[in-house]
Image (tube, rainbow, N blue to C red):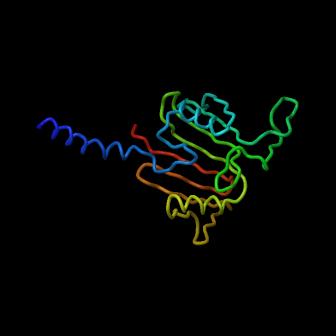
Amino acid sequence: MSSIRYLAGAALVFVPVIALAQSPFEISGLHMELDFTEAVAKAEKLGGTCQITTSRTQDGGKIAQCGYLPCIEHNLAGECEKWDLDAPKLTIAAQPIMQIGLEAPGDISRLTRILILFEGSTVAVAESLEREFGPPKIHGNSQGKSWTHSRRISWTQGNYHMGLMNSPKLISLTVDRAQ
C-alpha cells in the first residue's frame, strides 16, 4: 500500500514537470521539443526537400533548409530560379509555405529555432494563428507599424516564443533553453 502512495506522490511531482516541457506552439506537427533528426524527418514527410548544412555561427550546429514549392525553372547551375506558387506542397491558412528552416546544436539535440517562410496574405496567417493560440502582442506604434515598415506580432508562453513578420513573411518559433 505504501508503494502505491510513493508512486502516486512521484507522479504528482513529475507530471507537472513533463507537462511544462511540451511546446505550446506547433505548426504542421513541428515544435521546439523535437530533436533535429526527428524534425527533418517530419519536414520531409510534409513534402519538403531538405538540405542539411553545418551552421556558420561561432556555436556551430546543424541547419536544415526544406523547400515546399515545385521548381518550374532552373538556372545553368541547377539551382531553382522560379517556383510554382500555384502548386504548394504545404500551406498555412491557405497561404503557400515556401521554405522551413530548422536549427539545432546537433543531430540529436532539440531544436533551437524553426523558421517558416511563406507567400500570400500575412493577415490570413495572423488571424489563423490568433484563432489557434490566442491574442498576440503587437510591436510598434498603436497602428502596429514600425520605422522599418515591417510589422511584427508575437506570442509567448513561458520560455516559448512565436513571432510573425510581414517583411519578410516569416513565422519563427524559438525557446529559451537553460544553459
Seen in the picture, residue 16 relative to 167 is either above or below; the reply is: above
Residue 62 in the figure: left or right of residue 83: left
Residue 2 spot, x, y in % from top left: 11, 37
**Residue visible at 71% across and 50% down?**
96
Classify the position of the C terminus by image quarter: top left
Seen in the picture, residue 11 relative to 128 is either above or below; the reply is: above
Residue 95 spot, x, y in % from top left: 69, 54
Residue farthest bottom in this picture: 142
**Residue visible at 54% across and 62% down?**
131
Residue 41 in the figure: left or right of residue 99: left
**Residue visible at 63% across and 61% down?**
151
Residue farthest right in this picture: 76
Residue 15 spot, x, y in % from top left: 30, 44
* Quadrant in which residue 103 is drawn: top right
Residue 97 spot, x, y in % from top left: 68, 47
Q: Nearer the viewer, residue 66 or 47?
A: 47
Q: Nearer the viewer, residue 43 or 172?
A: 43
Classify the position of the N terminus by image quarter: top left
Residue 41 in the figure: left or right of residue 98: left
* Quadrant in which residue 178 is drawn: top left
Q: Nearer the viewer, residue 161 or 98?
A: 98
How many marks the image carries: the answer is 0
Residue farthest left in this picture: 2
